[in-house]
Amino acid sequence: MKSPVQCENMVEIRTEIDALDREIIRLIGQRFGYVKAASKFKTSETSVKAPERFKAMIVQRRTWAEEEGIHPDAIEKMYTDLVNYFIEEEMNHWKNQQPT
């Protein structure tokens, strides 16, 4: 992988960005596996939604964004959308595990 300053043209830059995006998506998929696995330890719909954990997670991601020189509002929006989707999927997974 080339660093941004090593890239000599737009083709190289786009190639590196595509490689990074592929890795990011792979990691998001891995994160989703942990989300689904967590559902077996949840005891209620409230524990699946975990609003206090959600708030704390957003605060931490904002801090990490600032440390990386990324605007924290952009990261908050991205994680809010992503995690809300994961919560919805986890809720479905959790409900399917409950005795009927």
Image (cartoon, grey):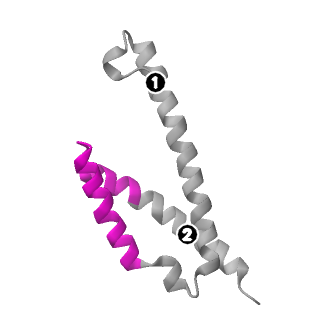
Residue 47 pos. (x, y %): 50, 83
Using the rendered image of the protein, determine whether residue 33 is visible from the camera's viewpoint: yes
Left or right: residue 57 versus residue 30 is left
26, 88: nearer the viewer: 26
Kind of residue at disc 1: Glu
Q: Main secondary structure of the magenta part?
A: helix
Please tell me the numbered disc located at residue 88.
2
Kind of residue at disc 2: Glu
Please tell me the numbered disc located at residue 66.
none
- Cα separation, mark 1 vs mark 2, equals 32 Å
Which residue sits at x=27%, y=57%?
62
Please tell me the numbered disc located at residue 16.
1
Residue 16 pos. (x, y %): 46, 24
Q: Quadrant of residue 68?
A: top left
Q: Is residue 44 above or below residue 11?
A: below
Quadrant of the image containing the C terminus: bottom right
Look at the image and give the residue range highlighted in magenta. Answer: 51-79
